[in-house]
Image (cartoon, rainbow, N blue to C red):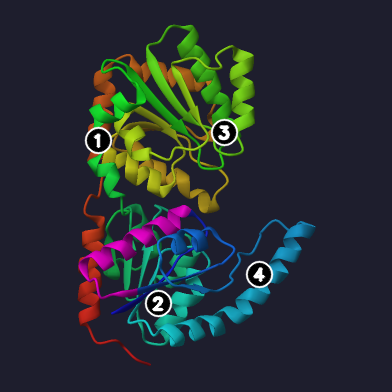
Amino acid sequence: MKVLIAAGGTAGHINPALAIAAYLKERRPDTEIAFAGRREGMEFGLVRKQGYPFYHIEVQGIQRSLTPHNILRNIKALWYLSSSGRKSRRILRDFGPDLVIGTGGYVSGPVVLSAAKMGIRTAIHEQNAFPGVTNKILAKQVDLVFAAMPDAVEKLAVPHKTIVTGNPVRPEILRADREKARAKLGIRPDQLCLLSFGGSLGARTINQVIAQLAEWQIKNGKDFFQIHATGSYGVELFHKLCEEKGILGDPHLMVREYIDDMAGCLAAADLVISRSGAITISELAAAGRASILIPSPNVAENHQYYNALELSRPGAAILIEEKDLTGDKLIRTVDELTQNPDTLKQMGVAAFGCAHLNSLEKIYAHLEKLMQKEPQRP
């Protein structure tokens, strides 16, 4: 069997694609898998690192804000769009897939749509509660639609062929040992651990309020161990804020640019403060962690807000929109939640109740059924 996967843009689209690819190879080792994406995008490095063949196709989104720079970008985007169908068909003829899977990003649009028109079996996976434009268009054309969150089903508008599977979660998240993780990080068994991050690039507002939170907990003698990832753009800012507040180098505060051992940090944490990207939501649920979620306001369709609702509705998370976020509000919220350890435990149980631990098994089972059907050649 040959499978072509189209994914691009962000790690939130690419990592589920890689997880699906790895599981397909595990279950059917003879499967040939290739990827289609942008060579200039994040997908190129991540896919090649895993050793999969990579087909290059350049696709770019239309910018709604019409600045001089964006007008030039839009001209380029329209040029790419005009040739994307022809390039997609060439890729499909060259590789000859039996199945094409799209996991989001602009690049999945022309590849999956061309495959559907050519009668190749197709499926898409939507990671967010509020689907992206590309997947909303593709949903009507493909054979199968996988949705990570129940709220996406209605918005995708094809409930008869949509299956709620959750997002694939890295196995290490499920296997992580809390006691070993805390011992490795130097956290005492009776010490409360806070974990905070704002994404790989970092978020200025989150860095600012976390610095205020750290100052409050350190200067008020709170027995917390706080792990914070600044993101690449926040390294200097957070260092400066900690220096100004007199907390730089405090043993209760561990500062990193990026968390490269998320499984261990999640296992060690009692409370997580973060954005609400789709994969973050899935990992918080799988780890059973209480959280304070601050959706990014700078994403399409405000989809992080709808992701956060998936955990805030059942009481697994506190949702604070960035427009309402202040250092004082975050401090009050953390103080209230940590007054009673049972509160965090109950939130963690509620989070775990939202987890989809067999996401890959579900996706694979439905793909197997699809592959047993005769393809509808035009």
Estimate how packed mark 4 is, as few (under 14), some (14 to 19) or many (20 or more) residues with alpha carbons within 10 Å.
some
Q: Which residue is mark 3?
A: 323
Q: Secondary structure at mark 2?
A: loop
Whichever of callouts 3 and 2 sits on the residue coming sooner in the sequence is 2
- Is label 4 or label 1 in front? 4
Q: In 3D space, how far apart are the residues under numbered discs 4 and 2 (Cα atoms)?
A: 23 Å
Measure the alpha-carbon separation of dots 3 and 2.
38 Å
Which residue is at the front of the view, 306 or 5? 5
Question: Mark 4 or mark 3, which has the lower sequence index?
Answer: 4
Res 6 → quadrant: bottom left
Q: Callout 1: 10 Å neighbours few (<14), some, many (20+)?
A: many
If you read the primary sequence from the N terminus, does the residue marked by circle 4 or circle 1 appear first?
4
Q: Is 149 on the left-hand or right-hand side of 108?
A: left
Q: Residue at point 40% right, 10% down?
A: 222
Q: Which mark sits nearer the N-terminus, 4 or 2?
A: 4
Which residue has dot 4 on it?
A: 77
At 53% from the left and 66% from the top, the residue drawn is 106
Is 263 part of what is drawn in magenta? no
- What distance separates the C-alpha of mark 1 from that of mark 2? 36 Å
